[in-house]
Image (spheres, coloured by chain):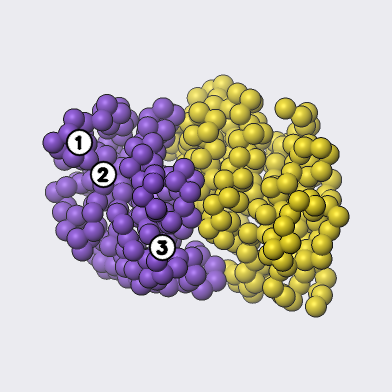
Chain colours: A purple, B yellow
Amino acid sequence: MACGEDKEQKQDPRIEGIAASIRVVPDFPKKGIMFQDITTLLLDPKTFKNTVDLFVERYLGKDISVVAGIEARGFIFGPPIALAIGAKFIPLRKPRKLPGEVISEKYVLEYGTDCLEMHVGAVQPGDRALVVDDLIATGGTLCAAMNLLERAGAEVVECACVIELPELKGREKLNGKPLYILVESR
Amino acid sequence: MPPYSPSASAPLVRSLRLPSPSPLLPRTLPSSHLSRLRLPSFRRRLLLSVSTAVRAMASEGGEDHRLPRIASTIRVIPDFPKPGIMFQDITTLLLDHEAFRDTIDMFVERYRDKRITVVAGIEARGFIFGPPIALAIGCKFVPMRKPKKLPGEVISEEYSLEYGTDKMEMHVGAVQPGDRALVIDDLIATGGTLSAAIRLLERVGAEVVECACVIELPELQGYQRLGGKPLFVLVKAAEGEAVV
């Protein structure tokens, strides 16, 4: 099922094609999970372009100075958006991938915890940031990303994902920060 | 498009020595920018040099005017991930919007008329450079990933590490016979990862047109492991002698 950003408005005509290009793979990474696979979206240049354009149209002219992309699929969508709107791109990574000095934020998994890291000095106080990932599920990773940016003094303007799994209520983990998505998957 | 000859041998190297001002630097660089090219003192001097394959793209016979800025934004981190390794960090390039844009533009200018149908980007830093190139030239982007990340049916290729082996995977059906492919990563070191990517693409019948990286470590001779496929890089990085 697809939805536009605003249910009162008519859905942008590009959304339907984007939703249709996402492949669902059952029982990955484990039984019971219906995995939302965006690699098929990336195989259609027009659809990939439409996806990026929808984000760019929303954020151009909003004074965004930072696009933070979450490893690894956030690295696919974040940089084209950053390039188009004239912002820095900052990779937020799993532990021990970024060289040099980093700050670290723990977050909760279904079993156990994980960590997200950001370079010290990448973000300055007063930076206006977008957080980008392909999908929001429980919101744990996005929440960790926002915390990293805010600890460095940036203002998180919005989180942007291609897909939301609304039943997992990730939105509620975002401390009131707005979430913009293109496609809902139920 | 200026002619270039793809070849498996390393392109001739012209040294662009930093930090001392070089006659190779375009005279139009503002002096404030020249001072940005001064590297902090490390134990070893870093020589950044420009491939003459790139020189083929430049206007008026000099190297492309965008390269010094691109090269200057790359940060070198000593002893990462382990002692003795000088890590070439491109995250600082991504913080400079103009340098990042110029980097992408230089690849796009080279490939837009080459009938490329697939850009294959190697996880994870190839995911940063590959998609903007694919979007600009209007072709598919295919992620080449570590094991067990891609859902659904994959093919797998093993490659050597310094100690042991690793695997790279690609989706079945992403690439068709006859596809003309570019392989993108931020850096080529030993060439092991790139050669695994080439083999995956060729196994499904694609033609690998070229491998493209921002940085090469020429002393590791990775270009020799590409099965004869040509390599295009913007910046070569090598360790020189100790200086003040």
* Label 3 with label 1: CB-CB less than 8 Å: no
Q: Earlier in the sequence, mark 3 or mark 2?
A: 3
Label 3 packing within 10 angstroms: few (<14), some (14-19), many (20+)? many
Q: Which mark is residue A127?
A: 3
Amino acid beneath label 2: Ile
* Label 3 with label 2: CB-CB less than 8 Å: no
Outermost top residue: B178
Amino acid beneath label 3: Asp
- Residue B81 figure quarter: bottom right
Query: Taking the image as drawn, is residue A117 in sight?
Result: no
The residue mark sitting in front, 3 or 1, is 3
Q: Does residue A18 appear left or right of residue A11 in this picture?
A: right
**Is A85 situated above or below B172?**
below
Q: Locate the C terminus of chain A by quadrant.
A: top left
* Residue at the spot of label 1: A3
Q: Which mark is residue B77?
A: none
Q: In percent of the image, x 20 and y 55: which residue is there? A: A170
Label 2 packing within 10 angstroms: few (<14), some (14-19), many (20+)? many
Amino acid beneath label 1: Cys
- Residue B72 figure quarter: bottom right
Quote the CA–CA distance across marks 3 and 2.
Answer: 22 Å
Chain letter for mark 2: A
Chain letter for mark 3: A
Q: In percent of the image, x 79 and y 32: which residue is there? A: B5
Quote the CA–CA distance across marks 1 and 2.
Answer: 8 Å
Chain letter for mark 1: A
* Label 1 with label 2: CB-CB less than 8 Å: yes
